[in-house]
Image (cartoon, grey):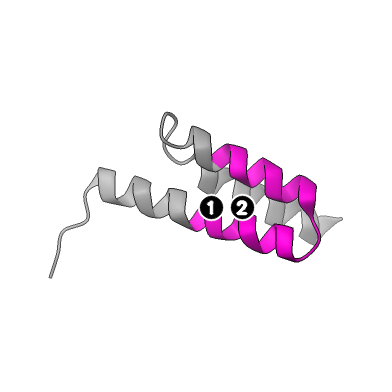
Amino acid sequence: MTNVNSRTANKLSIVSTLIDSALAFRRGRPKSGLLLLGAAALSSRIPGLGTAVSVLLRLVRRFR
């Protein structure tokens, strides 16, 4: 069993945000896609930002 350290968790968060961004573009939501793409880019400096933006977008869509 492998240990997950903070660097691995951060990379996983960035990759999942990039996947969310690609899915947003594919579903015809370019603003969400760009927001997620920017969040993924900034996640290397601010850990967890991509995940927070992704969760926030999902909540906004749900309560809209």
Front in this rendered view, residue 46 or 27: 27
In the rendered view, does 5 fall on the left or right side of 52?
A: left
Residue at x-position 21% and y-position 49%: 5
Does 57 sit above or below residue 62? above
At label 1, counting other C-alpha atoms closer than 10 Å, the crowd grade (few under 14, some 14-19, many 20 or more) is many
The numbered mark at residue 55 is 2
In the rendered view, does 41 fall on the left or right side of 63?
A: left
The residue stretch that appears in magenta: 16-39
Residue at x-position 60% and y-position 58%: 20
In the rendered view, does 49 fall on the left or right side of 4?
A: right
Front in this rendered view, residue 25 or 56: 25
Q: Main secondary structure of the magenta part?
A: helix
The residue that label 1 is drawn on is 17
Quarter of the picture containing the C terminus is bottom right
Q: Amino acid at mark 1?
A: Thr
Residue 56 percent coordinates (x, y) = 66, 48
Mark 2 secondary-structure assignment? helix
At label 2, counting other C-alpha atoms closer than 10 Å, the crowd grade (few under 14, some 14-19, many 20 or more) is few
Residue 26 percent coordinates (x, y) = 72, 65
Q: How many marks?
A: 2
Residue 9 percent coordinates (x, y) = 32, 51
Hey, which residue is sitting farthest right in the picture?
64
Residue at x-position 36% and y-position 49%: 11
